[in-house]
Image (tube, rainbow, N blue to C red):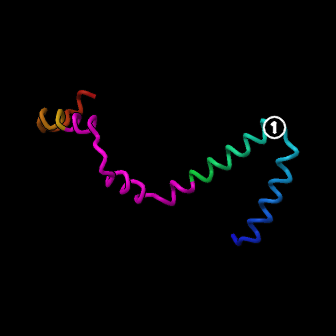
Amino acid sequence: MSAIASDNLASLIAAEVVTLPAEKQSSVLDYVRFIKHQAQVAEDGDEAWERIIADPRPRPKLEAFAKAAMAEGSKPMDLARF
């Protein structure tokens, strides 16, 4: 969508939103922010996971879980248990 179309759409939305009660205006803003966040998440895709994985901060709970899992050893999953 071009910037002109975006500006026009934004103006149309703004004109409609001001006719709503204040709590509904807040709901519209919350929804726009939700859609923006969803679009960003979809756009990031694997890049977001790569940033999380590459984060050098320590993860003590994850490390403890991994150590405990490794200590249990490896055995095939028993599907009869589920």
Where residue 75 appears, x then y in whole percent?
A: 13, 37
The secondary structure that most of the magenta stretch takes on is helix
Q: Residue 60's quadrant in the figure?
A: top left
Report the quarter where the C terminus lies.
top left
Q: Amino acid at mark 1?
A: Ala
Highlighted magenta segment, given as a residue range: 39-66
For image coordinates 61% across by 53% down, the residue present is 36
For image coordinates 80% across by 54% down, the residue present is 13
Q: Can you identify the residue that label 1 sits on?
A: 22
What is the number of callouts on the image? 1
Report the quarter where the N terminus lies.
bottom right
Within-10-Å neighbours for mark 1: few <14, some 14–19, many 20+: few
Asked whether, in this view, residue 1 is left or right of residue 74, the answer is right
Where residue 3 appears, x then y in whole percent?
A: 72, 70
Q: Residue furthest top?
A: 81
Residue 34's place in the image compared with 23, above or below, is below
Residue 12's place in the image compared with 59, above or below, is below
Residue closest to the eye, 67 or 81: 67
Residue closest to the eye, 10 or 60: 60
For image coordinates 28% across by 43% down, the residue present is 58
Where residue 24 appears, x then y in whole percent?
A: 78, 38
Q: Secondary structure at mark 1?
A: helix
Where residue 81 appears, x then y in whole percent?
A: 24, 27
Q: Is residue 42 magenta?
A: yes
Q: Is residue 53 magenta?
A: yes
